[in-house]
Image: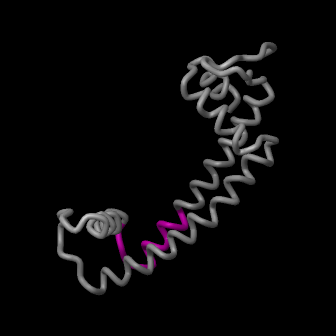
């Protein structure tokens, strides 16, 4: 693409290089996300909780009236609490990895977000990103 695309409603343009950088950062972010998901799944396995049961217990914790398939045992609650703490740590540890995935491509997190908003609202930009994969 030899021209620079201007996202709708933005004063700033997005260069072809930035489209490439954005697409590469997205690839890296997906890898980080997959790694994070795998680690969280392993935590649930270690605590002998299915993802569905973990979510159900979490929803009950946030809303005591939330219906659950089976009453939560003290043992399950303890395993949930351990898993939740580990999962929160995994999620916190993924934040610098996400930032690094973006900055290693030459973008700031702010610019990545700006481009992301433009891509989401502009089919032509979205196609450019897809073509960059």
The C terminus lies in which quarter of the figure?
Answer: top right
The answer to whether 101 is drawn above or below residue 91 in the figure is above
Q: Nearer the viewer, residue 48 or 116?
A: 116
Number of marks in the rendered image: 0
Q: Is residue 122 magenta?
A: no
The answer to whether 23 is drawn above or below residue 79 in the figure is above
* Residue at image point 77% right, 30% down: 18
The N terminus lies in which quarter of the figure?
Answer: top right
* Residue at image point 43% right, 74% down: 45
Residue 56: x, y in percent? 28, 65
Q: Is residue 45 magenta?
A: yes
Residue 20: x, y in percent? 75, 31
Secondary structure mostly seen in the magenta stretch: helix
Q: In this picture, which residue range is highlighted in magenta?
A: 38-50
Residue 99: x, y in percent? 71, 53
Q: Quadrant of residue 123?
A: top right
Residue furthest to the top in view is 3
Q: Quadrant of residue 11?
A: top right
* Residue at image point 61% right, 22% down: 127
* Residue at image point 30% right, 70% down: 61
Q: Image check: 59 left or right of 97?
A: left
Q: Nearer the viewer, residue 86 or 130?
A: 86
Q: Image check: 35 left or right of 21?
A: left
Q: Image check: 17 left or right of 31?
A: right
């Amino acid at each position: 693409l030899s021209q620079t695309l201007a996202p709708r409603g933005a004063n700033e343009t997005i260069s072809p290089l930035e489209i490439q950088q954005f697409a590469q950062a997205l690839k890296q972010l997906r890898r980080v996300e997959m790694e994070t998901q795998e680690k969280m799944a392993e935590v649930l396995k270690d605590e002998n909780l299915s993802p569905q049961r973990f979510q159900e217990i979490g929803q009950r914790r946030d809303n005591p009236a939330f219906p659950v398939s089976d009453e939560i045992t003290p043992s399950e609650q303890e395993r949930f609490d351990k898993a939740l703490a580990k999962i929160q740590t995994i999620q916190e540890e993924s934040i610098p990895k996400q930032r690094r995935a973006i900055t290693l491509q030459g973008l700031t997190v702010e610019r990545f977000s700006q481009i992301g908003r433009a891509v989401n609202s502009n089919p032509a930009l979205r196609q450019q990103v897809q073509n960059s994969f």
